[in-house]
Image (cartoon, rainbow, N blue to C red):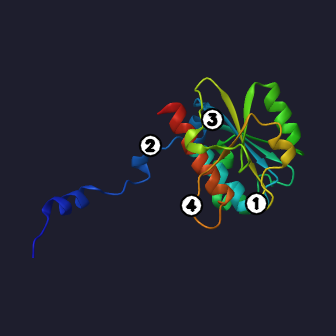
């Protein structure tokens, strides 16, 4: 039997970090920290767990804020908190009774609007360009109906996450995490 000591030593040195070793920001430090100029718009999201998960990912990527629109639930709510794990205290958010009002406000404030949707002219996520100087709003749609067509019609571009299986859809929280990482990576790494 041949023993590979290099692998054994690597595994021994790859110790999981404790919470103290992670260097996490406090809520006040997070709120004072510079955010990336990205706003997440949730267009009539039904699942409170999805909402909470988006908050948690938004915290991880230093997202400027979240707009909760239409039927999308608002904190505080037990089911949102279950997946947000406190991110509703760190990530700024606001509620709009319609996604249209949110889009109007964002456009008036100089944001480029991107729907995350499969459309005839959508751009694949890996081909989408994001400039550090831009203010960006990413619109994620309802779990069944997606982003409303009247909102897509007002977007600068639609971005599609490439998929290769039989379902051709991701959970909203998964989509948001994938897109936030790609935007962060392209703008800041």
Residue highlighted by disc 2 = 23
Residue highlighted by disc 4 = 164
- Give the spatial CA distance, label 2 vs label 1: 35 Å
Q: Is residue 17 left or right of residue 140?
A: left
* In the depicted structure, whether residue 164 falls above or below residue 132: below
Q: Which mark is residue 143?
A: 1
Q: Position of residue 72 (x, y in %)?
A: 81, 54
Looking at the rendered image, the disc whose residue lies closer to the viewer, 1 or 4, is 4
Residue highlighted by disc 3 = 31
The residue at 84%/47% (across/down) is: 149
How many numbered dots are placed on residues in this image? 4
The residue at 69%/44% (across/down) is: 122
Judged from the image, the secondary structure of the residue bearing numbered disc 2 is loop
Q: Position of residue 55 (x, y in %)?
A: 66, 49
Looking at the image, do the residues carrying marks 2 and 3 touch, with CB atoms under 8 Å apart? Answer: no
Judged from the image, the secondary structure of the residue bearing numbered disc 3 is helix
Between discs 2 and 3, the one toward the N terminus: 2
Between discs 2 and 4, the one toward the N terminus: 2
Looking at the rendered image, the disc whose residue lies closer to the viewer, 2 or 4, is 4
């Amino acid at each position: 039997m041949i023993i590979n000591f290099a692998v054994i030593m690597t595994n021994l040195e790859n110790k999981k970090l404790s919470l103290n070793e992670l260097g996490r920001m406090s809520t006040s430090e997070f709120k004072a920290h510079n955010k990336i100029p990205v706003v997440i718009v949730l267009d009539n999201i039904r699942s409170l767990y999805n909402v909470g998960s988006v908050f948690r990912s938004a915290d991880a990527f230093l997202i400027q804020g979240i707009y909760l629109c239409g039927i999308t639930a608002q904190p505080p709510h037990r089911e949102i908190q279950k997946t947000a794990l406190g991110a509703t205290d760190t990530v700024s958010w606001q509620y709009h009774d319609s996604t249209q009002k949110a889009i109007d406000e964002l456009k008036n404030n100089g944001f480029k609007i991107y729907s995350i949707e499969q459309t005839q002219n959508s751009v694949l996520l890996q081909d989408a360009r994001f400039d550090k100087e831009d203010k960006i709003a990413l619109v994620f749609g309802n779990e069944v109906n997606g982003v409303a067509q009247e909102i897509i019609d007002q977007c600068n571009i639609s971005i599609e996450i490439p998929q290769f299986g039989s379902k051709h859809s991701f959970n909203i929280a998964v989509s948001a995490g994938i897109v936030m990482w790609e935007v962060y990576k392209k703008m800041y790494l």
